[in-house]
Amino acid sequence: MEVSEYDLNGNGRIDPDERKIMMEDRRRKMEDADSKRDTQRRLTVACTAGMLLYPVVIVFAVWTGLDRAAELITDIASVYVIGASGVVAAYFGFNAMESKITSSTSKVEYREYDK
């Protein structure tokens, strides 16, 4: 965080009004990050549930006598599972990268303040 970003009047200090703006900006950034994580988590849960329920849908279609529907669902199963697996893998991969970046960034910040 740079002071100049929130020092609107250019006096080199963050005044109370500027501090309110800074805190509001931080709060919004945290809310946006939380919302993004929640959305990604819901998408991943939906894809995982879909992959787990896909065989059940095929068995149900065969059991109810919808053999043609079961064939069609089976034909697209490989594409669906690959796509959904990609979404789940990307979620976990990007979360791992983000946590690694966050931990290395926080270490750098602490080192700068220790000097």
Image (tube, rainbow, N blue to C red):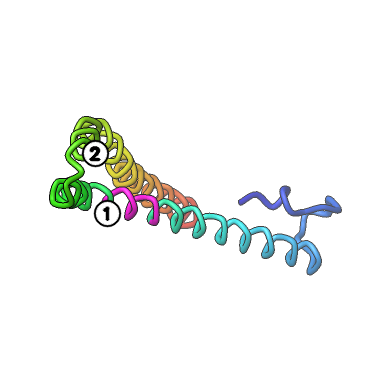
Residue stretch rendered in magenta on the structure: 42-49
Q: How many marks?
A: 2
- Give the numbered dot on residue 69: 2
Residue 82 lies left or right of residue 2; in this view the side is left
Q: Residue at x 69, y 52 (%)?
A: 3
Mark 2 Cα shell of 10 Å, populated few (<14), some (14-19), many (≥20): some
Disc 1 versus disc 2: distance between alpha carbons? 20 Å
Q: Amino acid at mark 2?
A: Ala
Residue at position x 74%, y 67% in the image: 20
Type of amino acid at the residue the image marks with label 1:
Ala
The verdict on residue 57 being magenta is: no
The quadrant where residue 19 appears: bottom right
- State the SS at label 2: helix
Residue 16, quarter of the rendered image: bottom right
Q: Position of residue 4 (x, y in %)?
A: 73, 48
Q: Nearer the viewer, mark 1 or mark 2?
A: 2
Decide which of 35, 17 is in the foreground and name it.
35
Kindly indicate whether the residue at mark 2 contacts the one at mark 1 (C-beta within 8 angstroms).
no
Q: Which mark is residue 49?
A: 1
Could you say which is closer to the camera, residue 80 or residue 15? 80
Residue at the outermost right position: 9
Q: Is residue 103 left or right of residue 69?
A: right
Report x, y in % for residue 71: 18, 34
Q: Main secondary structure of the magenta part?
A: helix
Q: Quadrant of residue 42?
A: bottom left
